[in-house]
Image (spheres, grey):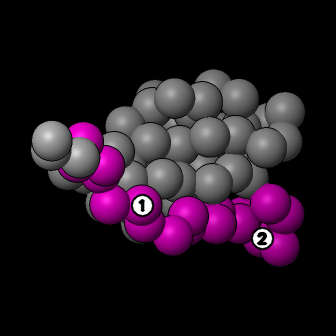
Amino acid sequence: MMQPVMPAVTDPFVVEVWGKLAGVVLQEGEAFRFHAVAPPFQALEGRSFPKPGHARLAAVCLERGTFR
């Protein structure tokens, strides 16, 4: 009997903006999904990014008011 193959669990990537906790990014396949932990960053909740650093850049832009 074969055991089911579980996907590899990766460490979460914590996203901070100017010393404030914005969210956590978890790898899902080839993408990285943002999970907001503070209300100002809810606009990014569930968004997928190609790299964890892109999620941080989006959070910085959101904080600055330049996120599109």
Q: Quadrant of the N terminus?
A: top left
Label annotation for residue 18:
2
- The residue lying toward the viewer, choosing from 6 and 61, is 6
Up the image or down, 7 lies above or below 11; here it is above
- The residue lying toward the viewer, choosing from 54 and 60, is 54
Label annotation for residue 40:
none
Q: Crowding at label 1, few (<14), some or many (≥20) Cα neighbours within 10 Å?
A: few
Magenta extent: 4-21
Which residue is at a point 60% across and 30% down the rendered structure image?
45
Q: Position of residue 3 (x, y in %)?
A: 23, 46
Up the image or down, 53 lies above or below 59; here it is below
Q: Secondary structure at mark 1?
A: loop
Of mark 2 and mark 1, the one earlier in the sequence is 1
Q: Amino acid at mark 2?
A: Trp
Which residue is at a point 69% across and 51% down the rendered structure image?
23
Q: Crowding at label 2, few (<14), some or many (≥20) Cα neighbours within 10 Å?
A: few
Q: Position of residue 13 (x, y in %)?
A: 55, 67
Is 16 in the magenta?
A: yes
Which residue is at a point 32% across and 60% down the rendered structure image?
8
- For the residues labelled 2 and 1, the Cα–Cα distance comes to 28 Å
Is 28 in the magenta?
A: no
Label annotation for residue 9:
1
Q: Position of residue 46 (x, y in %)?
A: 51, 29
